[in-house]
Image: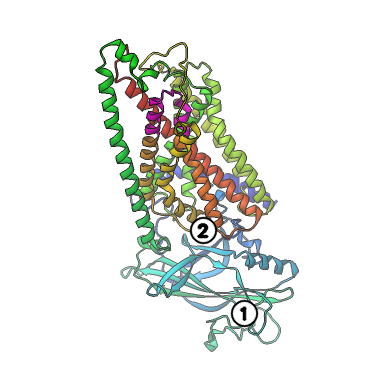
Amino acid sequence: MESGSRSMHRLTATIIWPILFLFLIHAAHCFYLPGVAPEDFQKGDPLRVKVNKLTSIKTQLPYSYYSLPFCPPEKIVDSAENLGEVLRGDRIENSPYVFKMREPHMCTVLCHITLDAKTAKLFKEKIDDEYRVNMILDNLPIVVPIRRLDQDSSTVYQLGYHVGLKGQYSGSKEEKYFIHNHLAFTVKYHRDPQTDSARIVGFEVKPYSIKHEYEGKWNEKSRLTTCDPHNKRTVVNSNTPQEVEAKKEIIFTYDVEYQESDVKWASRWDAYLLMNDDQIHWFSIVNSLMIVLFLSGMVAMIMLRTLYRDISRYNELETQEEAQEETGWKLVHGDVFRPPSNSDLLCVYVGTGVQFLGMVLVTMIFAVFGFLSPSNRGGLMTAMLLLWVFMGIFAGYASARLYKMFKGAEWKKLAFRTACMFPGIVFAIFFFLNAIIWGQKSSGAVPFGTMFALVLMWFGISVPLVFVGGYVGFKKPAIEDPVKTNKIPRQIPEQAWYMNPTFSILIGGILPFGAVFIELFFILTSIWLNQFYYIFGFLFLVFIILLITCAEITIVLCYFQLCSEDYLWWWRSYLTSGSSALYLFLYATFYFFTKLEITKLVSGLLYFGYMLIASYAFFVLTGTIGFYACFWFTRLIYSSVKID
């Protein structure tokens, strides 16, 4: 009954929170982000410490905190998670830790347990896979400060602390497992001298493994000899660590220290976001942008000069004999707007690409303005899903407009395919991966309630909006071609080897991929190495450069194709820039083998499954950009010359 009520609670939260998210954005104050307004604490006020999932970069499978036999509170209470948090595998629950603002205490005993064979095995497995414990205080995740001696003794912060560690006793070669059973917490606060209230600006921990000792038989009043504030004996090292073995007793303890800080509440996330060497990040991005901008400028300049010369030359031809001797893109004017094979499928993919483009653009604008910062957990994914659903109207409109231009008549069938094809393929892969995660009993498995909510959003909102967009688009007058299409198709002459469709398509994807591959490294690192991604301004610039690059490289290759009297440009224009997705997947494979430590089959399947979804989405996005650039280009040049 309890698991059923928790499932219903999650189902309700999953459906309601996405709707509330929009109202929160609308109702938010002009300074604070939704749900992350500061909270003032007076001395002695209770602080609620919450526990989150256990994470590992070796397995990529999160588990709930209480999947291990840690000390539980009297009653475990789930925090209401938004849709993004559930999909990320977050499971936020209360904890037995008792903090009171600016009231430090030492050597507080949390609980005393005795391991059996099963619980000892659980701990060992998590230590083997280097799992980390994540906690939250006042919306701040816990970090472990680490001094770096190589860079002027600067401090870096690692998210979460390890469950334990492996090691050997001196003089022994046998490897033992040790658990971090003593936590030295440090809560940093910024005090207002006028009101004496304080705001939390930091949450740090130093974990220790210590075999606690006591006199006599253990009871609730037993005093530890290894950690006793009365005798001024505190834990400062792990010289006598606590082993993880069956029938071993473990005593969990903790300290809480409070430190006043000059860091203000508005800047408290800076330490979390500056975890890496940002100079390399910034230099690499700027360098990439400069190279791509230079190449794009050169391509645009060559294209404008060459086209201007072509159009001037064609329009100066006076006699029919001269026109017949002429070769090049003007000769195929009677076939260039002939509908392609599988035109319905092209319309579906173009409509889906417009939907994806709208979602990405609006999401990035929200992110640049700070609405989707890491402090708003799950906000980014929630916003992306909601925007995808509501952008369905543009997908239906774009696909129907193109479909009518191709003289199509069954717009309802097209709208249904547009609404279901891409999401259906993604959902099938996602469902398969979720079944694998569920089989591992991981908290990353999406609950049935959330699955139901996703399907409800898909068929209840997205599909109807696609039909609305399709209806509006189909009712519009058909787009007229600038030139008439001949009834009999022209024969395409034999092409040079470098104009082979496969070769030109693969070449076309290199430049768009080059625009994003450095930024891609940091995105993959944030996703798979459990770090924060925060430079959305640079990401937006890279995205704009990607749009320009996709458009220009497709136009250039389309121009060369038409000059070779090959008028089958419709699908090739889509595939030219869309082929950058192939390079993205190959780079993801390279990243897997060079940067990640994943060894388990299940974790490998998850990685490649999710990267396949990402690459497919990238294909749809970049392909649509290339298609529309080519569509605009061909209409422009053929409307600029006099056709007899």
Q: Secondary structure at mark 2?
A: loop
Q: Pointers 2 and 1 in contact (CB under 8 A)?
A: no
Considering the whole magenta stretch, tell me its main secondary structure: helix
Q: Is residue 354 visible?
A: no
Q: How is the image coloured?
A: rainbow
User: What residue is shown with label 2?
Assistant: 530
Quarter location, residue 508: top left
**Residue 28 position within the rendered picture, expressed as x and y whole percent measured from the top left:** 38, 48
- Residue 172 in the image: above or below residue 569: below
Q: Amino acid at mark 1?
A: Pro
Q: Is residue 475 visible?
A: yes
Q: Give yes or no for residue 566 being in the magenta stretch.
A: yes
**Residue 119 position within the rendered picture, expressed as x and y whole percent measured from the top left:** 71, 67
Q: Tell me the magenta residue range.
A: 554-575
Q: Amino acid at mark 2?
A: Asn
Q: Nearer the viewer, residue 587 or 644?
A: 644
Quick check: 405 left or right of 427? left
- Residue 559 in the image: above or below residue 155: above
Report how far apart the C-alphas of labels 2 and 1 lie in the structure.
28 Å
Q: Earlier in the sequence, mark 2 or mark 1?
A: 1
Q: Secondary structure at mark 1?
A: loop
Locate the C terminus and report the quarter of the image it occupies. Answer: top left
Quick check: 361 left or right of 236? left
Residue at 57% in and 64% down: 132
Q: Give yes or no for residue 392 being in the magenta stretch.
A: no
User: What residue is shown with label 1?
Assistant: 241
